[in-house]
Image (cartoon, grey):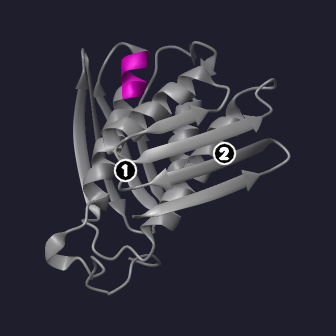
Amino acid sequence: MRQATVERKTKETQILVSVNLDGTGEYTITTGIGFLDHMLEQLSRHSLMDLNVQGQGDIHIDFHHMTEDTGIAIGEAVSKALGDLKGITRYGSATIPMDETLTRVNLDVSRRPYLIWKVDFTKPKLGDMDTELFKEWFQAFAHGAGITLHVENIYGENNHHIVESCFKALARAFRQAIEIDTRKAYAIPSTKGTLGGSL
């Protein structure tokens, strides 16, 4: 079982994350930010990654630090659980509809973190959460996990649907990428024999 626990402590947040990449999509998530919790629940359920996130921090100031730091911590836990990356499929893609919205995610579990974010919002907030923070979460997750991540909202009107489709598409693409390829279960999926570093 590919599992890991990461604890991140700063003067701004204290976050404990546990992941099981070979789980069933069970989750326990408490960050103090209701909408973020809801999105992380979607990530867990649709990737089948068991996810436990317990966070405390300075959300009385704003939600930036908690949002970013949960992305970092979840990403680092994922990277740790993936280990040497032997046997993974490596690439994943998903196009997810949600009513009037369509979002596409493509990713490469490569140890080369990069984010392309082509998502626009028509409102500055969803509930109490600034919509600009969703890019911060995806950036932090991509960096922590060492994933090349492309997120594109193709079209949509409802901001809630746009965000949720991004997380669901990430979940499905991630699930595909970390599946073990039984034909190469003990091989690094690269002609170089290693992942990370230069192209």
Number of labels in the image equals: 2
Q: Is mark 2 on a helix, strand or loop?
A: helix
Q: Choose top left, top right, bottom left or bottom right for residue 160.
A: top left
Residue corresponding to mark 1:
23
Which one is nearer the viewer's eye here, 65 or 23? 23
In the rendered image, the vertical position of residue 72 relative to residue 184, given as above or below: above
The residue range painted magenta reads 160-164
71 relative to 182 in the view: left or right: right
Q: Which amino acid does label 1 sit on?
A: Gly
Mark 2 is surrounded, within 10 Å at the Cα level, by few (under 14), some (14 to 19) or many (20 or more) other residues, namely: many
Residue corresponding to mark 2:
69
Q: Residue 103: x, y in percent?
A: 29, 32
Residue at 23% across / 42% down in the picture?
Answer: 94
125 relative to 81 in the view: left or right: right
132 relative to 178 in the view: left or right: right
Q: Assign the C terminus to one quadrant of the image.
A: bottom left
